[in-house]
Image (cartoon, rainbow, N blue to C red):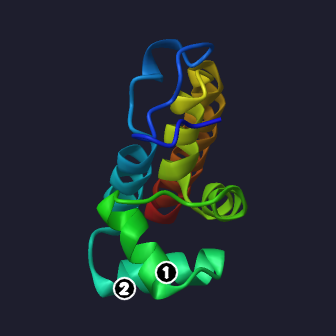
Amino acid sequence: MLPKKDNKLPPGRGGSYHHLNFNGAIAAALREELGSTHQAVKTVMHWTGASESAVKTWLTGSHGPSGEHLVALVRDSDEVLKIFLLLAGRSKHLLGIRIADLRSYLVETIECIDRLD
C-alpha cells in the first residue's frame, strides 16, 4: 500500500525502483507515449473512462490513477505497462515485451523487403 504522504513506493521487493514517485512515474510514461496535448488527455479519457480533470492530474503527476484506472492504462499503454513492471520490481518481464516488439519490427522489415521484389 502506498503511503499517503508522498506516494513513494515502500521499500521491499521493488528492487532499485522503490524510490520512484508513483505519480511522477505514471505521468512521465503517459507523456512519453502521448505527449502533453489535449489530444493526450482525450486519449487517456477514452482508455479509462476517467474525467478530464482526473486525467490532467495524472499527466501533471500531482495525482495517480486508482487501481481500476491503472489496469485500464496498462491495457492500452505500453509505456505505463513498462513503468508498472519497473515499479513492481519485475523488470525481468520487460524482456518478453522487448522480444514481442522486436518480432513485430522484424515482420514489418520482412514485409518491406518482400515489397521490393
The residue indicated by pointer 1 is 43
**Image quadrant assignment for residue 12:** top right
Q: Nearer the viewer, residue 21 or 73?
A: 21
How far apart are the two marked residues, 2 and 1, measured between alpha carbons? 6 Å
Residue 99 image offset from top left, x and y in percent: 60, 32
Q: Of helix, strand and loop, which one carries label 2? A: helix
Q: Residue at x 53, y 55 (%)?
A: 108
Q: Residue at x 45, y 22 (%)?
A: 17
- Asked if 109 appears above or below 13 in the picture, the reply is below
Q: Nearer the viewer, residue 93 or 19?
A: 19
Q: Quadrant of the N terminus?
A: top right
Residue 74 image offset from top left, x and y in percent: 63, 54
Crowding around mark 1 (Cα neighbors within 10 Å: few <14, some 14 to 19, many 20+) is some
Decide: marks 2, 1 in contact (CB < 8 A)?
A: yes
- Asked if 110 appears above or below 97 in the picture, the reply is below
Residue 20 image offset from top left, x and y in percent: 39, 31
Q: Amino acid at mark 1?
A: Thr
Crowding around mark 2 (Cα neighbors within 10 Å: few <14, some 14 to 19, many 20+) is few
**Image quadrant assignment for residue 65:** bottom right
The residue indicated by pointer 2 is 39
